[in-house]
Amino acid sequence: MAAITIAEVSKIYHGNVEAVKSVSIDIEDGEFIVLVGPSGCGKSTLLRMVAGLETISKGTVTIGSRVINDVDPAERDIAMVFQNYALYPHMTVYDNLAYGLKNRKTPKAEIDARVAEAARMLEIEPYLARKPRALSGGQRQRVAMGRAIVRKPAAFLFDEPLSNLDAKLRVSMRGEIKRLQKRLGTTSLYVTHDQLEAMTLADRLVVLNGGRIEQIGRPLDVYHRPASTFVASFIGSPAMNLIKGQIEGGSLQIGLYRIELGSRAPVEGAVTVGLRAEDLRLAGVGEDAMLFQVDYVEELGAQRLVHGTIEGQPLTIALSPEMPLSGDLAVTIAVDRLHFFSPETGKRLERGTSFAGDAPAQNLRLETAS
Amino acid sequence: MYRTKIFDHVILLFGVFIMVAPVVVAFMTSTHEAADIHRNGLSLTWGGHFVETYQTVLTRQGGFTGKITGFNMMLNSMILGLGFAVGKIVLSMLAAYALVYFRFPLATFFFWVIFTTLLLPLEVRILPSYEVMNTLKLTNTYTGLIVPLLASATGTFYFRQFFKSVPDELLEAARIDGAGPFKFFIDVLVPLSRTMMAAIFIIMFVYGWNQYLWPTLMTTDEGFFTLVRGIKQILLVWVGSNIPDYNEAFALAILAMLPPVMIVVIFQRWFIKGLTESDK
């Protein structure tokens, strides 16, 4: 058990390709950190540098009080769970679990005890004598996790461990990983491209894009206050709607609609406006509303995703299935729920001192410019 | 689903007949007396001298110096076949391990150097090879018989392709589990290559067993004669009115066939597994 400090770490491949660009993360003891981002964002490279499977081009990684840049992977006191499990196919489940301990010259009795304990925890006791080939995907994943647990390492590293499982199993394994990590209290670094996995597992999540950190924060903070348009569109499902707007004299102009922001206008000029699909709702009678032209509908059962346009800009709205649908809908949003981003840099623009959920939700006030 | 029809079996039976007939003829002929064979040619009937002929062949002291028996020759062939197959597997696995898992300068270049040795079979380099062995005073030794045959690319090539298909994560998992290069090789790669090793063992054993030219060149001492040479030796006695011992030649040929056949039969399942599927 230990804290991990990643300080200004870069990975430069030959040909001067920078896969990870000066990333710094402070991971507290026992914390569950999820690295999330699209493929090619450098998240796996970063994890593999912590594991020692890739050399660190620049910066330092510290586990506990030890800088481990030049330490052999076996000596780093970490355990890793791979996407394709990487179980030794010719060894039984027991030997798979015991192999790392045997190599460390652990006494036989202790190996037995630790394997038994891990097997009990993961409910794989009946399979100890089997070869991985005779196990299902979920069972293999448990064995892979068992191999990490028996070592009692300072940190667990997970490299997309659930990607090879079917959707249902993924959900249940997700729960188990979370429970197990809480129970063992082992510092964990988890890589995934699945934002849902990231949201549900993380104590804090790190959103990576193009080798850089876009945002570090607790899942709900990241969700409610995305630091950039990239984070806004990556975290949350459906993705946050991003449309073009213009702020002039304290009011936001979207096409023909004009929305009063009062003193809370972040800047003057062009902005990217972010609207969560679930923050948009149908306007009541007599309420100011925008005209939403329905394109097509996705039924999710508990929710209904309506895709369409406002003023020609594509948008998705999450509605309750009970609501009646028609070709055109009158929709509205609480002004506090609007997010603003710079159209040039994509960075979030803060609105004065208030943010979502702070002030009583103030409804949209519109003036139609025509 | 395709249902086998009578005609399919006819084709297969025809194939079996073509393949097996010469062996049957050789076996049947070997049970006749040499004079009969000389007079009547090959035979398909049972000659009734099975026990005597095979006993003579296995135990009689033969050759000029008379210190080699069929049994000794069989032993020599076995040493050559096994030594060659095992040596080749060990050598090519190590070479492939180095080529696939270790980054060293000019690795690809060395691979191609090894690969081009495919173009240089023993027959092509037989004179320099002999010269080297002679200088090292290794003629008439098992070492001289086996070692020059070992260096060739086939095994290395097979194992290289196989190692490349082993997922990288296995190596990474082993590294994190504290296995060094040697442990990884012994604990993970070797067990994974078992079927591959069996397949190559069969091919190489048969190849080594059937060597004729190199043993002929390397061994002048009859104590080192192999079975394949021995057959020739029997037919060499055609001087004056002597009739060569055809029956014994045939018997030796049958004996020479047995071990490779047994190896193939025993390892058949592994052989097919090794060439078609992998244990990953």
Image: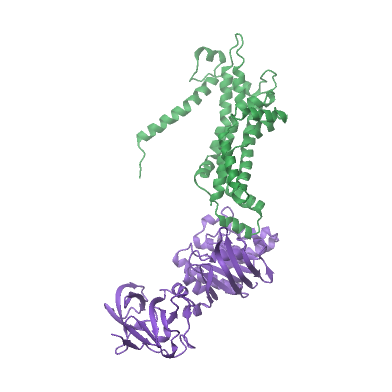
Q: Quadrant of the C terminus of chain A?
A: bottom left
Q: Is residue B21 left or right of residue B250?
A: left
Q: Quadrant of the N terminus of chain A?
A: bottom right
Front one among B43 and A71: A71
Give above or below for B50 relative to B183.
above
Spot occupied by residue B209 in the image (x, y as percentages of width and height): 60, 31
Q: Is residue B10 left or right of residue B219?
A: left
Q: Is residue A123 visible?
A: no
Q: Tell me what hue chain A is rendered in.
A: purple
Front one among B113 and B204: B113
Spot occupied by residue A257 in the image (x, y as percentages of width and height): 33, 84
Give above or below for B256 relative to A275.
above
Residue extending farthest to the left is: A327
Spot occupied by residue A242 in the image (x, y as percentages of width and height): 40, 76
Spot occupied by residue A211 in the image (x, y as percentages of width and height): 53, 67
Give above or below for A245 relative to B6.
below
Q: Which quarter of the picture shows residue B91?
A: top right
Q: Is residue B93 visible?
A: yes
Residue at position x 65%, y 30% from top?
B129
Q: Tell me what hue chain B is rendered in.
A: green
